[in-house]
Image (cartoon, rainbow, N blue to C red):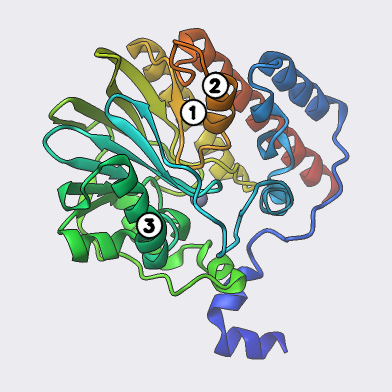
Amino acid sequence: MRYLLLVFFPVVAAALETPSLEPIPETDSVVVAAHVARAKEIAGERFDFLASSFLCRPAENSIAHAIRTVPGFLDPKAPAVEPFQAFDNLYYVGLHAIGTWIVDTGEGLILFDSLNSEADARNVLLPGMYELGLDPTGLEYVIITHGHFDHYGGASFLGREFGARIAMSAPDWNYLRKDISLPHAVMAGYPEVVQPERDLVVADGQVFSMGSASVEFMVTPGHTPGTLSSILTVQDQGQERKIGMWGGQALPWQEDELAQMHESLHKFWHEGKRQGVEGLISTHAWVVGNFELRNRGRGVAENPLLIGKDGFDRIMRIYDECIKAQFGRNHARHHLD
Ligand SMILES: [Zn+2]
């Protein structure tokens, strides 16, 4: 049977290498538990969504955990969330589990990620943009944070329909062929996913300015070989602010990829600190608490997504502890082998 699967359904065969949808038992060693406890301590109540979410659990469980706890995760029928303006020139449009961030530079729109498929782009992205008064004919660039289908699925449609250029890092353009998320799309029953044709390549350290905004790109491998993270300069009540966008969320369970992510995190953290980053967004907005912070901050004059330099630093420390916890789990596993 397995032979048949391998011959006729290479897509399904690839799925055998992806994490199980059945959670593995979570019995952490003292060392691992100490990192998890430290992450929770750093998070406190303010950032509890981070330390208690899937980030600090065994990486092998991240998909299974997200399916159980995140509304609409890997659900092709997930409804759109209310689109919103987060900063003067930055907007969120999408689903709960995955979304897009749109920068309105005044000279054109830059879109980060493109939802799961053309169907999502038509049924979620475009209506959301119209609702916010954003004209999709102004779409100039679609930046794909990394080569998983939930990030690039709508891109080729946007390129075709609006002439938007599609940008990704070189390693992730190459990675598309072996995207390990595609089998999940097939199994979950998403409408057909069309991969974008290789277009613009974004390099590490590249700074891109357009109208009222600028984006500094960082290649931060770990989640995928060429995950793109960014530091954005946006406007808040007429004032310039720096915010970070971490490009890949779920921790890899392979040791070398985890080590890459750890190194990438420190690079992003260091650069963010140097530039005075005061907020953190993600196209998986739920992971970094963008929805929670907004809900808690309703009716407050201050922008709830501005968590301050200290907030950024704390979140980076939580990621760091969760990665260290995963290193500890990997080491424990190797000792059992
Ligand atoms: Zn991904």
User: Is 262 or 164 nearer to us in this picture?
Assistant: 164
Of the two numbered discs 1 and 2 on the same chain, state the one appearing first in sequence: 1
Closest to the camera, between mark 1 and mark 2, is 2
> Which residue bears the numbered disc 2?
316
User: Is 275 or 204 nearer to us in this picture?
Assistant: 275
Indicate the position of residue 257 as horizontal and vertical percent values.
54, 44
What residue lies at 56% left-to-right and 43% top-to-bottom?
A: 256
Is residue 114 visible in the rendered image? The answer is no
Callouts 3 and 2 close, C-beta under 8 Å: no
Is residue 331 visible in the rendered image? The answer is yes
In the rendered image, the vertical position of residue 43 relative to residue 285, given as above or below: above
- Say which quarter of the image contains residue 255: top right
Closest to the camera, between mark 3 and mark 1, is 3
> Which residue bears the numbered disc 3?
152
> Which residue bears the numbered disc 1?
265
Tell me if 29 is positioned left or right of 136 in this view.
Answer: right
| Dot 1 amino acid type | Leu
Classify mark 3: helix, strand or loop: helix
Of the two numbered discs 3 and 1 on the same chain, state the one appearing first in sequence: 3
Classify mark 1: helix, strand or loop: helix
| Dot 3 amino acid type | Tyr
Callouts 1 and 2 close, C-beta under 8 Å: yes
Callouts 3 and 1 close, C-beta under 8 Å: no
Indicate the position of residue 201 as horizontal and vertical percent values.
22, 49
Instruction: Report the quarter where the N terminus lies.
Output: bottom right
| Dot 2 amino acid type | Met
Classify mark 2: helix, strand or loop: helix
Q: Residues within 10 Å of mark 3 (few under 14, many from 20)?
A: many
What residue lies at 50% left-to-right and 17% top-to-bottom?
A: 312
What residue lies at 50% left-to-right and 12% top-to-bottom?
A: 300
What residue lies at 56% left-to-right and 70% top-to-bottom?
A: 183
